[in-house]
Amino acid sequence: MSNPSLLILPGDGIGPEVMAEVRRIIDWYGAKRGLVFDVSEDLVGGCAYDAHGTPLHDDTMAKAQEVDAVLLGAVGGPKYDSLDFSLKPERGLLRLRKEMDLYANLRPAQCFDALADFSSLKTDVVAGLDIMIVRELTSGVYFGEPRGIFEEGNERVGINTQRYTESEIDRVARSAFELAMRRNRKLCSMEKANVMESGVLWREVVTEVGKDYPEVALTHMYADAGAMQLTRWPKQFDVIVTDNLFGDLLSDLAAMLTGSLGMLPSASLGAPMANGRPKALYEPVHGSAPDIAGQGKANPIACILSFAMALRYSFDQGAEADRLEKAVERVLADGLRTADLLGQEGVAPVTTAEMGSAILAAL
Amino acid sequence: MSNPSLLILPGDGIGPEVMAEVRRIIDWYGAKRGLVFDVSEDLVGGCAYDAHGTPLHDDTMAKAQEVDAVLLGAVGGPKYDSLDFSLKPERGLLRLRKEMDLYANLRPAQCFDALADFSSLKTDVVAGLDIMIVRELTSGVYFGEPRGIFEEGNERVGINTQRYTESEIDRVARSAFELAMRRNRKLCSMEKANVMESGVLWREVVTEVGKDYPEVALTHMYADAGAMQLTRWPKQFDVIVTDNLFGDLLSDLAAMLTGSLGMLPSASLGAPMANGRPKALYEPVHGSAPDIAGQGKANPIACILSFAMALRYSFDQGAEADRLEKAVERVLADGLRTADLLGQEGVAPVTTAEMGSAILAAL
Ligand SMILES: CC(C)[C@H](C(=O)O)[C@@H](O)C(=O)O
Ligand SMILES: CC(C)[C@H](C(=O)O)[C@@H](O)C(=O)O
């Protein structure tokens, strides 16, 4: 049997430096735990544009379709701000999501005990927080047609289309209910059914799917109220399911609540492949942080924990994922902090590589 | 010269009880400050549906077009959840906004000193917070066509359209720049120009309008990053301008940050009428809170401060608005709290009417 395959796309900004630490972890798993991966590496985002004039080369896209999982760093940077919309670094990432049909984006918002102080929220509001946001990732206003900037009379009009079919809502709702079953059996669905018909359909389909999961307590909330409730008392939630655009805002908001933004991973999952594994892409929640790129300041933990999610969701290695997550917690409990996590006590920051080494040692 | 005219629409839930306190304040201004208003009252939302089978009767709409300002309580309630989309209480409010063409929704997010403790955020993050969100209110996905639930193949699809013309963006951007000029001359515009073409046009037009306001420091932020930055360190902002849907979420988020949700007013302004006053509707940010309606528990301050905004923006009575706002601050400083503001010390709550009386006394 051949080894499981991983395509690594470090991307732009701090992407390459955080991914370098993940590669060391991957190597450790091969050497010490007999978990050998066939790893290939390629370009996405601004660096792909620099090399090929497109944020995602067709060959890279084809490779991503073939591997067992893709691991992505981050894309984007001010250098590419003036590029045409269709050439922007983000389009590379969006193409991967769309063509791999990764419809369920799992974004855990977890507050690490050692970092609870670091949140802008009161410690009791966030300590122990552990929620999971399931964001629809391949439809909605991100991909709906018609879209573009058009002439109309003597002015221009910018148009995007929010669009959800029943089956698109159904499948992501199922992913969310499945997760809720493995967690605390509470699911809150968020939309704007009071204003948008696409939200009316969303609510209807989620309710319908809920009949197949009678053990899960399903609630519905308008997305604006959701933003408020996440801010007021996030621990009222377990799993949240929402559309692509609301999910973009709400999952970033939830991530920021934890104070652990540099720590948070994500998984984007599609339908099972022939080998039973879901199509999958794993990436940290943080961006490419061009301002600190190349300085050894970046926190590699979000990217390392994204690999832990890959172990769990793509490779059925839940125990090894736990091991890696525990190693991260231990290092944090020992007081190690990259520069993004400072400001609390008089701790001196460690570099990206030092953090990677400490996690390796803790493994 | 005739008196300025006010149309009062108490609406549903706690709307009528908070509005009753505002009427006492209005009467006080007539008796004590010679500011006499011609006040009429009518129905909107669920109560209008109960009476007329529509959430806003055409006669009410016509009245709203004629008065100098509309004061609205709140709309909605579970009783109306199963109504058809076009009959829901919210449609009454949305029709008012649209037909009065109230394109600039001003939503101050202000943290009252006496209530800083009450926020879920750390006190130093929110104490003294005073930002203004300008939300576009008459276009975007709230009103764009096509919209609805359609059959497609053998399933249904929910569709809404995000749509902004250059002139729609231009006019709300001007409102925001004007406000920034009267405040700290900092304006941050939020969209998703990395994903949505309507956001690309938004950013372009706001940048163009900015050339007419060289003294205002203009920045741009993606809306997801905006949600994060509002949570992390809201005091970095002065005025924020954003579209209808992002504004819905971000202004509610900002309101919740302050811990003063029951305190926050809003103004929705349109173009100047023949008498030079802008078309205007004022309403509290909070909802109809059906769970506590009719129990004398509701906090009337947001609605009272909405009337203060009316004094300022519709009736050129800035000094009288200041007076009313100061009276509210005094009462809070004295320790008076409605039930929504409890949980800190061992204070006993006052009723809606007691709060109203205290503010009257402080005036
Ligand atoms: C980079 C950008 C296109 C992306 C998005 O908007 O989905 C990002 O914000 C995310 O949440 O993954
Ligand atoms: C009641 C609802 C239609 C409304 C909106 O979505 O605009 C409300 O949330 C608001 O922010 O005023």
Image (cartoon, coloured by chain):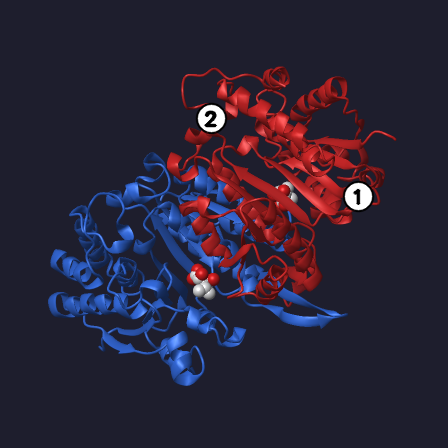
Chain colours: A blue, B red
The residue drawn where x is 29% and y is 70% is A16
Give whichever of A316, B222 is nearer the camera.
Answer: B222
- Residue B114: mark: 2
Circle 1 Cα neighbour tier, 10 Å, few/some/many (<14 / 14–19 / ≥20): few
Q: Nearer the viewer, mark 2 or mark 1?
A: 1
Q: Residue A259 or A198: which is nearer the viewer? A: A259
Q: Residue at x 85, y 38 (%)?
A: B59
Disc nearer the start of the sequence (2/1): 2
Q: Position of residue B16 (x, y in %)?
A: 69, 26
CA distance separating discs 2 and 1: 37 Å
Question: Residue A263 location in percent, x, y?
Answer: 30, 54
Depicted B179 relative to depicted B115: above or below? below
Task: Using the image as rendered, state which of residue A251 and residue B309 is in the foreground.
Answer: B309
Task: Say few, some or many: other residues with alpha carbon within 10 Å of mark 2 (under 14 / 14 to 19 / 20 or more).
Answer: some
Could you tell me residue A135's position as x and y percent? 46, 56
Q: Which residue is mark 1?
A: B276
What kind of element bears circle 2?
A: helix
Instruction: Name the residue type under label 2.
Output: Ala
**Position of residue B71 in the picture relative to residue B39 (left or right):** left
Residue appearing at x 41%, y 48% in the figure = A254
- Kind of residue at badge 1: Gly
Q: Which quarter of the rendered image does ligand 2 occupy?
A: top right
Query: Does A255 sit above or below residue A287?
Result: above
Is A80 rendered above or below residue A183?
below
Identify which residue is drawn at 58% across, 52% down.
B241
SS type, badge 1: loop
